[in-house]
Amino acid sequence: MSQETVGAVSPSATTPPGDRAAAATAPDSAPATGVAADPAAAFPAASAHSHAKDSFAKLTLGSIGVVYGDIGTSPLYALKTALQHNGTEAVPQSEVIGIISLLIWALLITVTAKYVVFLMRADNKGEGGTLSLMALAQHALGRRGGAVFLLGVMGAALFSGDAIITPAISVLSAVEGLGVAQASLVPYILPITVVILIALFSVQRSGTAKVATFFGPVMVLFFGLIGFLGVIHIADAPVVLTAFNPWHGLRFLFGNGATGFVTLGLVFLAVTGAEALYADMGHFGRKPIQTAWLLFVLPALLLNYLGQGALVIHDPAAVKDPFYLMVPNWALIPFVVLSTLATVIASQAVITGAFSLIRQAIQLGLLPRMEILHTSETTEGQIFVPRANRMMLVGVLLLVFLFKSSDALANAYGIAVTGTMVVTTSLAYFVVTKMWNWPKVWAVPFIGFFLVIDVAFLLANFAKVLDGGWVPLLLASASMLLMWTWVRGTALLAQKTHRDSISTRGLIAMLAKSKPVRVPGTAIFLTSDPEVAPSSLMHNLKHNKVLHERIVIMSVKTVDAPRVAPSNRYRIEPMSDSFTAITLSYGYMEIPRMPAALATLRKAGLKFDIMTTSFFLGRRTLKASNHSFMPKWQDHLFIALSKQAATATDFFSIPSDRVVELGAQVSV
């Protein structure tokens, strides 16, 4: 999107006063993010990525490479883990068919019906994902609903656990194929996994554009081979085709007591990655993703699971690793290499997804600012978050050393994904009732059907809490605590700032009487609320006792749409002969860049010389107050988070030689 097209934002696009406290000013008085009351009205031209430039076939191929990496590598461990619920001894034929029946119908109901057919219709200007759905639900409600906001935060927090566990279990499960090919290679599985993971996270800084061109063809080859292997082995025991009858799955689930329920949690591993179908919709579009799933990915997965089941029925000893034992010995090593490459692709998809989620969370005011780097000059969505990358690598390596095998990690995997699915389904209820205007007599049973299945999967996974399920719960709890502390702390800080400040118009009236000394040039003061005099402006007057000839009060707002059309990027409001208020509006999928914004404003006719323009920022040093509205420990956590936040200069790409920072100490 070009940011140099000019236009004006309608007045309704700005954050209403009631939302400004929740918009959360940053600790150094740089612009905070808010949510527009009515983005649909204010940003009618806003849209997601335009897919017209790329052919349908290219987009479909790209979706196979990026979107389906996670769910596509589930056959490496899903059926094996479910079959081994009672150990590695022979599994009765009825149980094999029952478990495969559950796998089949999980793919058909949870992935196909819920995500591919239903949820992908709930797009926010072409974007999907938990936070996009949260923004859509908030817009449907017409306010920042507490329940909706909490669900969105929960979904984002649970995804953080998924983003750390996925690379660990995916790569580890693939490399374990070396042990099947040659027992003497078992001691090298862990070191090889660690090397691959370190290399994967190390290349993130250079971007994935070049590597991504190979993702599609590699995954097409992978899916084609696993489907072909499935077809070959179905002939080992054609009775496995009866698994399409859901009765076999239900009989296994309800006829085996606690064992059947625990196995349901392991069966869920087959649908991990389904959230990516929805989250990556903005990158490829709805139709290419749906086409790839229905015509290629789903048939390949079904055939492979059926082939694995037939092999186990024919040769019970194959239960130890049916995925790799389907492959002829002469082709095993090359297939392990291909599978490992596929798991790296799956990991890459979830890593980039985590970067996008973090960017959204920062723009929505859920996290402090972090340094975000663009790795592509042409693709806006390709970003790199250094701090998040380091934290994820440490977390992934800790999991690998702690659990040491994909079977053990499987116990930790399901809770994060099932929890996210419960959140997504719950948010969808607000969309279908408030935005799509479905009557509750239809909406409740429809959403309830999917919610019952999601909750059943979640409860089944809770049975594994002590065996590793505590890991995603711990990660999600920590993430929620950080987001809650940041949102609460910044809201309280905003209230305190507003309480202790004077209005901008009141200050202008005072200056008209006192007439301070004027110096040449333009001064831009960044603030979260143009109606309140920025602290940096007040400190400049107090200490320097001068004003520039032209004063710009600039604020940056985030709306609950993925992107803002270039024609709606800014609003200019003259406040006096020398004071001008400018509001820049960005979507939560965008990163504000001040140089591009200034270029847009100059083309719009705002006269200023960049060489005589200075940016004034307020840098706050926070200290805990004895009369805080937060517990003492939360005060200190908020202060620690604020110290880790990237400076406004870095986050908004402001030329550092044009910045003046004025400090102040504030109690929270």
Image (cartoon, rainbow, N blue to C red):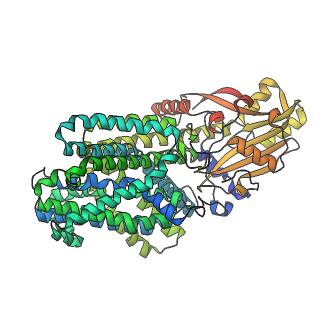
Q: Is residue 142 visible?
A: yes
Q: Is residue 38 visible?
A: no
Q: Position of residue 342 (x, y in %)?
A: 36, 50
Relative to 165, residue 124 above or below: below
Q: Residue at x 35, y 41 (%)?
A: 474
Q: Position of residue 211 (x, y in %)?
A: 47, 47
Front position in the image: 625 or 436: 436
Q: Residue furthest front?
A: 330
Front position in the image: 372 or 22: 372
Image quadrant where residue 405 sits: top left
Is residue 143 found left or right of 660 in the rendered image? left
Quadrant location, the N terminus: bottom right
Q: Position of residue 54 (x, y in %)?
A: 57, 61
Front position in the image: 24 or 338: 338
Q: Residue at x 18, y 65 (%)?
A: 98
Relative to 439, residue 521 above or below: above
